[in-house]
Image (tube, rainbow, N blue to C red):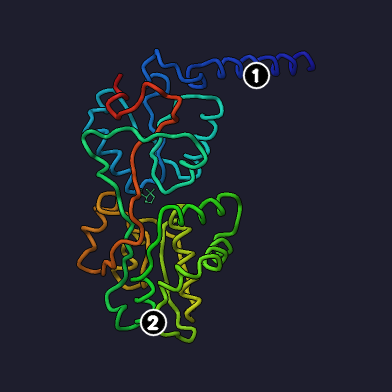
Amino acid sequence: MWKKLRLISLLSIVSLLLVSCGTELAPYDAKKPLGEQINYTITGIDAGAGIMLSTQNAIKAYKLDDYNWQLQTSSTAAMTSTLEKAIKDKRPIVVTGWTPHWMFTKFDLKFLDDPKNVYGDAEDIHTIVRKGLKKDMPSAYAVLDNFNWTPEEMSKVMLEVNDGADPEEAAKKWVKNNPDKVAEWTKGVQKVNGDKIKLTYVAWDSEIASTNVVAEVLRSVGYKPTIQAMEIQPMWASVATGAADGMVAAWLPNTAGVYYKDYKSDIEDLGINLKGAKVGLAVPTYMKNINSIEDLKK
Ligand code: PBE
């Protein structure tokens, strides 16, 4: 009995050692082709995200599929945790990356050049509302129309949430600490008395931050906002059908371009609330030889 147990534990130690010596857990080796070091796998996020669609397009445009490159679907949380572990051991990894996001603050990452411009140039985030909102809720419409901030401001809220703060609390704190900005968004806006308003969003870190901040500002002018997280397609549909009043989560022109095209006649685009977002493939900076999407074929 004990002998058998000892044998089993010995075997599991040996197999653990074997796994950790295997190529998949080895540090990045600049002399070897990258693909074989990471099983030709790009670590992605949730299936519907625009960055996933763009990455499928990139795989085709750069003919990465000829090399059997594939995109792994997961979630932002799983992707960032895989990234964190890889970086700890200086292992190679390619992820779907974007800014503003704390991954670029917390880790030394670089975007891969995209000579075919599949991911488009800089992206902006737009505010989208349901038709008729201006007439039905002029104060909310005005706040949503005025809402705009910088990647730095958004990052501040995002980092707090990533450090463990409750998103609503982090938003409250930001609103309290930025009275001038909030005054700009609420200038001339007439207060209301507990009117209900519903915002939808996808639970990406950036949108958790922006949606909570906007909800807090709407609260400050007398609304009772609810915010509801959903998948990207239902989020667009909810505003287009009027089931929700609006959202501040439209990455355009490229990332959510397909959804915009589908729904544009049934929504109102209030324009940019954040300028200078960016989407692409990213790798840790210690992957010195990998600087362009083309390099994935080396
Ligand atoms: N993102 C973050 C989203 C938009 C916000 C880049 C992951 C996407 O649709 O890809």
Give the Cα separation between the discs numbered 1 and 2: 69 Å
Instruction: Give, as a three-letter code, the residue at label 2.
Output: Gly
Give the image location of residue 268, x and y in percent. 26, 69
Q: Does any atom of ligand 1 lie closer than 8 Å to the CB of label 1?
A: no
How many numbered marks does the figure carry? 2
- Mark 1 residue crowding within 10 angstroms, few (<14) / some (14–19) / many (20+): few
Give the image location of residue 1, x and y in percent. 78, 17
Label whose residue precedes the other's in the sequence (1 or 2): 1
Label 1: state its secondary structure: helix
Q: Give the residue at the far bottom of this rendering.
A: 193
Q: Is residue 60 above or below residue 243?
A: above
Q: Residue 188 carries which label?
A: 2
- Mark 2 residue crowding within 10 angstroms, few (<14) / some (14–19) / many (20+): few
Residue drawn where x is 28% and y is 79% of the image: 132
Residue denoted by label 1: 12
Label 2: state its secondary structure: loop
